[in-house]
Amino acid sequence: FCQTLLHTVIPPELRFAVLKLFQRLFTCFSSYSYYEITEIDGVNTNELYNAVQLYLSSSASSATSAAGTTSNRLSLTRGLNSSNITFGLANNDRLSDVFNGVSVMWEHIVTPKQSQTFSWRPLPEEKRGFILRMNKKDTPRILQDYLDFITERANEIRRKNQDRLLYTNSRGGCLDSRGHPWESVPFKHPSTFDTLAMDPVKKMLIMSDLRDFTDGQAFYKRTGRAWKRGYLLYGPPGTGKSSMIAAMANFLGYDIYDLELTEVNTNSELRKLLMKTSSKSIIVIEDIDCSINLTNRKKTTGARSRNTSSTSFDGVPDVRSSSGGPVGPVDQDINETNNSITLSGLLNFTDGLWSCCGSERIFVFTTNHIEKLDPALVRSGRMDMHIFMSYCSFPAIKILLKNYLGCDDGDIEPDVMDDLAAVIDAAEMTPADISEVLIKNRRDNHRALRELLEALRSRAEKKKLVNRRRRLEAEEEEVGVEEEEKRALDSPKEVGGAASGGGDDVEVNNKKGGKHEEEDNGIN
Ligand SMILES: Nc1ncnc2c1ncn2[C@@H]1O[C@H](COP(=O)(O)OP(=O)(O)OP(=O)(O)O)[C@@H](O)[C@H]1O
Ligand SMILES: [Mg+2]
């Protein structure tokens, strides 16, 4: 009755002014400061409101919220291009939080909108906002840091909730309508560090190295290093290099830029591609040894190419023929290359001035042949961590048995495990091959284990034969070389001709491996 009386007797303007006055008096004498963060400020969305909503949702959603009381009512939202749900504070709900030892209180205020003022854009029916209550004495010390922390945490949550994206430069150097050289697709590779079959100790090392990297902003700043890190994954085909990259991306919540070097024609294109990558991303060059040789990179301009030489990275045509032996100087006009990407371009791409355009990036190179890589490319500072993805080991096979057959250690007879342990190393089987055997028999565990043991034993047998044959060949070659040297010692010496000017005696016929080669020493 009083309220209606007030509403009827006192005009709204006066009511509003009295209310405002009470509020001012209240805040004057209160020990708290109050900050209102509305959803819409003017006509734009207030980014801080969304950040607070996300941030509070991360503590509201966890049963034991790090900060304060959990709310018993939450709103659920799902972002665009995301398969994850985020919690939010329900209307008029409160949540306390603690930051740097200071406790604050959040309240989510939702008030129905008064009369719709005319606007080009339909405004929401309700006015939403957060009220942050904080002790006046703490405000100067923590307000700014607290809001920065909230924004950062919200970005973190947003990225984790959004599906990963896989960017490719498959379009070559040309740009899309937005001037972007990368093309992106949702990246939903299921590989994680749990599904990766590899030595658990090595796995933990890699995960902690990745965590140190993401937590290391201050460290990189203090040491004056670009906030980036390089990983070289090497090993035989089918050992999990690509799966490792997916596991890293899923572990860190990073997007992946899959750089196809053979599509890149010049250093400046390479630079442009790097500049257009976002931070918190993994830049991948798979099979870098092939990319470096790039025999398919040469695009002759009409004339027949005398040899399929490859272009090394320093831009000078590589003078090794396809057989690897020396050939005469390569005619430049025959080998018109349409690219001038250089090793120095790639070196700067991964370390050096270029690599600092943007921070928090991970570079990953993969190769089946580490011995082919230029040492400058894989030195520390470029490829900081070299990870050998090896054939399946016993600890790794247990992970595959768990993932594919659902068998934990205790589920398999000990003597079967002993048989597996006895043959696994000698077999040198890749996880890809072992996965194949398990997938084929995944409906029948006993049969899967039996077939796996058979496959391992036959592979180990084959390896033994191959190694024995190699040993025999090596011994024969050794014997061959010894006989050679013996014959050479027994045969009479031939003195070099007078024209030699009495220089040192030189072998005119230098027999090497059964092939005579004229050593060009001026004497024929
Ligand atoms: N260590 C591993 N753990 C789990 N699965 C693996 C592992 N290695 C290979 N696989 C399985 O084998 C398949 C091929 O693996 P992946 O593509 O990662 O091999 P790779 O090392 O990248 O091979 P390549 O050198 O030919 O590119 C994947 O689908 C994956 O399921
Ligand atoms: Mg691969």
Image (spheres, grey):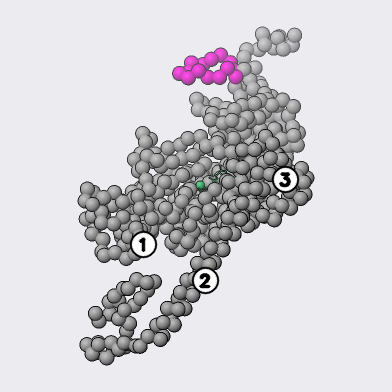
Q: Give the residue type at disc 2.
A: Glu
Quarter occupied by the C terminus: bottom left
Circle 1 sits on which residue?
324
Mark 1 residue type: Gly
The residue mark sitting in front, 1 or 2, is: 2
User: In the visual, does 312 lie left or right of 19?
Assistant: left
Can you say whether 72 is above or below 292 in the image?
above
Residue 252 vs 72, above or below: the answer is below
Judge the density around disc 2: few (<14), some (14-19), many (≥20) Cα neighbours within 10 Å. Answer: few
Magenta-span inclusion, residue 121: yes
Q: Is residue 447 visible?
A: yes
Q: Is residue 342 magenta?
A: no
Instruction: Mark 3 or mark 2: name the one nearer the start of the chain.
Output: 3
Residue 331 falls in which quadrant of the image?
bottom left
Q: CA distance from mark 1 to mark 3?
A: 68 Å
Q: Relative to the observer, which residue lies in front, 483 or 200? A: 483
**Residue 356, percent from left and from top:** 46, 53
- Residue depicted at x 37% and y 39%: 171
State the separation of the CA atoms marked 1 and 2.
Answer: 26 Å
Query: Residue tagged by mark 3?
Result: 101
Q: Secondary structure at mark 2?
A: helix
- In the picture of the structure, the residue carrying the numbered disc 2 is 475
